[in-house]
Image: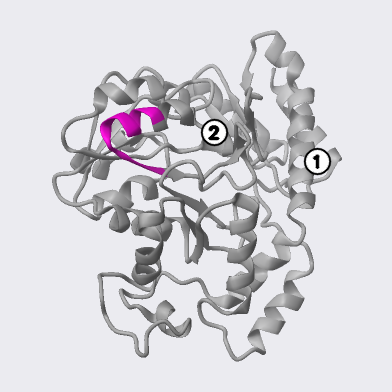
């Protein structure tokens, strides 16, 4: 069986994790956390990078930083993971979904403005499959209306939009290091990116249970105390050590995934050319990170048949999000603005193929040949 996902592992993680275990600081903000955060600030060119337990926690922190509360509205796509909505619903906000673009599966930036009301506080673009949303349009809308932008870049590490790293364009960005992502901190993990200077100091306070403990350790205050709301949003230094082992080979991992993606794209091009199926695309002005390679079939029935066929061929492929507005909680905490032309229909056609660091060319070719065999 060709697994859908194999968590990335370079071999150098062992040394770093063991070193962290033997150090005197294994909780949050230890030596490896500081090394990783400095790496991200340099690589992504952002004001502040803070490791957190998950992307979910990063989004929750973003909601607190921006001051989202009851009565506020947050605009986002319905085709996303539940954390995107949950983080803001937890603060009492109403989630407002708008339709997606079928070419990227991202939020349709042309539909955002009509969804804005006097209660709109935040726009949350989700960079699906590590492919950027049209951030120029989104930031222009946000600037005109005085609305914050929180980028859900969970899948977007090492992807760019017009030369800028995803997660660094909006006011705040959030990344995931879950085991299914291109880089992991040992199964779970996330990163909060702060691009707006007004949030830098408070982000450290919220992350440290609402205390000014970070200032204390920098010698800026003689004692630390409870100064704001917050929670325990720190990643263990053991996880940061695992992550550091991957950051040392970040380009190698990225190149491996891109080669797999390109092999899928080339191998399935004939079927695409005959309009039999649709695959992931290359988009102008945006570099992707090969986080995902997906197919879109005729409809949900053909998708089910394809998944069953691939399973018999020893290939584990999966479908993706069930649109949030159709879920039980979605009906309670959200509304869909406009018409659902693409969100449901496109989500029901989509299949994600196996793609992971270290996947062999022969395995990729087997997946491609199995798909061809179906037709």
Q: Position of residue 162 (x, y in %)?
A: 60, 31
Q: Residue at x 26, y 80 (%)?
A: 226
* Residue sticking out furthest to the front: 220
Camera-near label (2 vs 1) is 2
Count of marks, rendered view: 2
Would you say residue 146 sits in the magenta stretch?
yes
Can the viewer see residue 181?
A: no
Q: Which residue is mark 2?
A: 132
Of residues 32 and 311, which is closer to you in this image?
32
Question: Horizontally, is 136 left or right of 226 in the view?
Answer: right
Residue found 71% across the figure and 61% down from its top: 246
**Image height check: is 296 above or below 324?**
above
Dot 2 crowding, Cα within 10 Å, few <14, some 14–19, many 20+? many
Sequence-wise first label, 2 or 1: 2
Q: Position of residue 83 (x, y in %)?
A: 38, 50
Q: Residue at x 29, y 58 (%)?
A: 64
Position of 259 compared to 330: left or right?
right
Magenta span contains residue 70: no
Q: Position of residue 214 (x, y in %)?
A: 43, 78
Residue range corresponding to the magenta coloring: 140-150
The residue carrying pointer 1 sits among few (fewer than 14), some (14 to 19) or many (20 or more) residues within 10 Å by Cα, namely some
Circle 1 — which element?
helix
Image quadrant holding the C terminus, namely top right
Q: Residues under labels 2 and 1: Cα distance?
A: 28 Å
Q: Which residue is mark 1?
A: 363
């Amino acid at each position: 069986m060709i697994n859908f996902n194999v968590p990335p592992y370079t071999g150098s993680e062992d040394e770093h994790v063991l070193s962290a275990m033997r150090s005197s600081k294994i909780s949050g903000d230890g030596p490896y956390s500081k090394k990783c955060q400095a790496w991200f600030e340099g690589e992504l060119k952002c004001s502040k990078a803070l490791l957190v337990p998950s992307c979910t926690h990063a989004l929750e922190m973003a909601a607190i930083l921006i001051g989202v509360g009851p009565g506020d509205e947050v605009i986002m796509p319905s085709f996303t993971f539940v954390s995107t909505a949950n983080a803001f619903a937890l603060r009492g906000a109403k989630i407002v979904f708008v339709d997606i673009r079928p070419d990227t599966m991202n939020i349709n930036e042309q539909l955002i403005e009509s969804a804005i009301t006097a209660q709109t506080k935040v726009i949350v673009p989700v960079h699906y499959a590590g492919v950027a949303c049209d951030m120029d349009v989104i930031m222009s809308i946000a600037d005109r209306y005085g609305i914050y932008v929180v980028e859900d870049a969970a899948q977007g590490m090492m992807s760019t939009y017009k030369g800028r790293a995803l997660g660094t364009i909006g006011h705040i960005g959030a990344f995931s290091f879950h085991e299914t992502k291109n880089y992991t901190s040992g199964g779970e993990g996330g990163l909060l990116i702060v691009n707006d200077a007004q949030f830098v100091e408070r982000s450290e306070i919220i992350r440290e249970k609402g205390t000014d403990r970070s200032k204390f350790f920098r010698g800026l205050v003689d004692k630390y105390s409870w100064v704001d709301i917050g929670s325990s949003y720190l990643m263990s230094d053991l996880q940061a050590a695992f992550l550091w082992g991957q950051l040392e080979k970040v380009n190698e991992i990225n190149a491996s995934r891109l080669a797999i993606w390109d092999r899928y794209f080339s191998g399935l091009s004939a079927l695409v050319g005959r309009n039999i199926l649709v695959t992931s695309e290359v988009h102008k002005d945006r570099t992707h990170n090969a986080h995902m390679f997906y197919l879109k079939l005729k409809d949900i029935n053909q998708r089910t048949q394809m998944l069953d066929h691939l399973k018999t061929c020893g290939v584990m492929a999966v479908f993706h999000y069930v649109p949030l507005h159709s879920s039980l909680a979605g009906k309670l905490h959200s509304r869909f603005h406009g018409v659902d032309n693409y969100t449901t229909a496109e989500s029901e056609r989509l299949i994600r193929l196996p793609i992971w660091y270290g996947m062999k060319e022969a395995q990729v070719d087997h997946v491609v040949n199995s798909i061809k065999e179906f037709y």
